[in-house]
Image (spheres, rainbow, N blue to C red):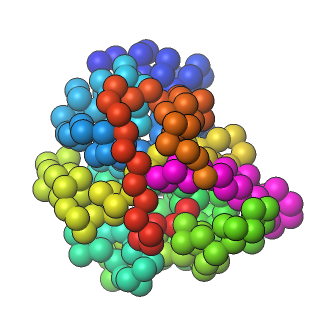
Amino acid sequence: MNLEEYFARTGYKGSLENQDLETLTDIFQHHIRAVPFENLSIHCGEKITLELEHVYNKIVRRKRGGWCMENNQLLGWVLKCLGYDASFLGAYVFNPHENAYANIMTHLLVKVVIDGKAYIVDGGFGVSYQMWQPMELVSGQDQPQAPGVFRFTEKNATWYLEKMRRKQYIPNQNFSNSDLLEKKECRKVYMFSLEPRTVEDFRFQCTYLQTSPDSLFTKKSICTLQTTNGFRALIGWTLTETTYNYKENMDLVEFITLKDEEVEKTLKEKFNITLERKLIPINVKGFYTI
């Protein structure tokens, strides 16, 4: 494992001299635009493991993506190698269909401290809830970014992340009531504490999420990648391409339904992913919004 190979994968060619916020943001944005958030291994007969060497090989050498435990673990390793004060936290993801936070800590986050200020660096959430810049860990302050307005709120040592989105323009009206569309303009994302975590704290969750019939990730095949002006996502056979701020306070959301024979080609052309095994797409209705 080496940093040069990782940066070749993400296309980052900037300076590595300073461990500052500007460099962190640039490295982070290259990561989220090159490495998809995806769970395709579950649906093509592969096992997801948390060993760093396996994660590195999958993302850097096989040019795949991963979920939070893979993306953020790799990102955390890179930042530590560069000399950043980086550590892991654990979050409980909000389920909009149950209107409640999960009771299992399933989301791995990176916390980075620069000049005494703490930032959350999360490269493993995907779709419209994917932050584009590290977020300063302050309570009650709007932090506008290209995807929308993010905000942390702290109550009794628990931190909550929420996001306010723009209005949406959907040209294909057949999808105007799609269960993939988030109906609320303000959406809770996850909650977390500042208790330091290790990858070991996620062993059970890693197995559970890829095997349990109750897991979102066994119900849907997901691949999503941030672009320079939005993001694209393939959920089952449904390809969406979102352009942020297409018009004033309006995001453009385009939907296409793919045929079976188009899925593999789309993964290659839109996400730069070539699978070694055959994918079996799945999209059980509900459970997930973009």
Quarter of the image for residue 13 reads: top right
Residue 48 in view: yes
Q: Residue at x 16, y 52 (%)?
A: 207
Residue 68 image offset from top left, x and y in percent: 36, 49
Find out whether residue 290 is within the magenta segment.
Answer: no
Residue 123 image offset from top left, x and y in percent: 45, 46
Find out whether residue 241 is within the magenta segment.
Answer: yes
**Is 105 left or right of 189, judged from the image as shown?**
left
Residue 47 image offset from top left, x and y in percent: 20, 40
103 or 258: nearer the viewer: 258
Q: Residue at x 55, y 66 (%)?
A: 180
Q: Which residues are magenta?
A: 234-256
Is 56 drawn above or below residue 125 in the view shown?
A: above
Quarter of the figure with the N terminus: top left
Quarter of the image for residue 173 reads: bottom right
**Is 150 left or right of 114, judged from the image as shown?**
right
Number of numbered discs: 0
Q: Residue at x 30, y 39 (%)?
A: 44
Quarter of the image for residue 106 reads: bottom left
Is 10 drawn above or below residue 236 in the view shown?
A: above
| Magenta segment main secondary structure | strand
**Is 288 left or right of 86, judged from the image as shown?**
right
Residue 90 in view: no
Quarter of the figure with the C terminus: bottom right
238 or 98: nearer the viewer: 238
Residue farthest toward the right in the current orientation of the protein? 248
Residue 186 image offset from top left, x and y in percent: 60, 78
248 or 13: nearer the viewer: 248
193 or 181: nearer the viewer: 181
Q: Residue at x 13, y 56 (%)?
A: 204
